[in-house]
Amino acid sequence: MDSAAAREQALDAAEELFYGRGIQSVGMDDIRGASGVSLKRLYQLFPAKEQLVEAYLERRDARWRGRLAAFVAGHEDPEQRILAVFDWLERWFGEPGFRGCAWINSYGELGATSTRVAERVRAHKEAFRDYVGELVADAGRDSAFASAVYLLAEGAMVTAGITGSTAPAAQAREAVRLLLASCE
């Protein structure tokens, strides 16, 4: 197996296990068993577990933001694009195996002890905040409005992860809709 294939297999296993069980409860031997990549090869690819966690978060970030952007792009009206963020969140919250936000979960587990993980989490949240800011600016709203939309989305993610419900997305969407209507 070449390095690229072994890396993808290891990351697939890491994502499933880290997201499903938590990072600290999963050892490199668990990743080996789930991926079929030998422990020696695994450590060649990721000399430390922290590097595997970092790679998992980076890969998940690209896919997560890509899926969100593709969904939102299906809406032409700038205000509907903002609301579409919450429609997408509601779908994501309803996916089988949803366990909340991977970055919030990772920060909760390792943010205080791993600078690298904290940096990956902050980079993801900053990219999401910037994306929301672009959508809001396209709708002719200011940065204060963007901050409110971003915080409603983040709050929905945390609440959905804790409650296991899709309702927080619809509730946050309605709050954004009311804000949009009140600013007309």
Image (cartoon, rainbow, N blue to C red):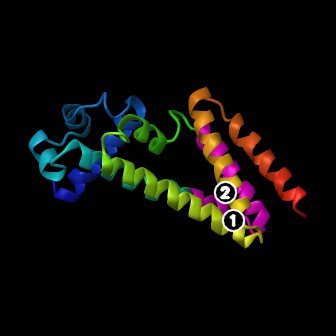
- For the stretch drawn in magenta, the main secondary structure is helix
Cα separation between marks 1 and 2: 6 Å
- Write the residue at 59% across / 43% down: 92
| Callout 2 secondary element | helix
For badge 1, the amino acid type reads Ser
In this view, 119 is above or below 21: below
Q: Which of the 4 image quarters holds residue 61?
A: bottom left
Name the residue nearer the viewer: 117 or 6.
117
Residue labelled with disc 1: 143
> Which mark identifies residue 2?
none
- Write the residue at 89% across / 57% down: 181
- 133 lies left or right of 80: left
Circle 1/circle 2 CB separation < 8 Å: yes
| Callout 1 secondary element | helix
In percent of width and height, residue 36 lies at 20, 39
Inspect this view and state whether residue 181 appears.
Answer: yes
In percent of width and height, residue 124 lies at 47, 55
In percent of width and height, residue 153 lies at 65, 48
Name the residue nearer the viewer: 166 or 159.
159
- Write the residue at 69% across / 60% down: 146
In this view, 97 is above or below 101: above
In percent of width and height, residue 114 lies at 30, 44
Residue labelled with disc 2: 147
Residue 4: in magenta span: no
Magenta segment: 68-94
For badge 2, the amino acid type reads Ser
Say which quadrant the C terminus sits in. bottom right
- Write the residue at 38% across / 42% down: 111
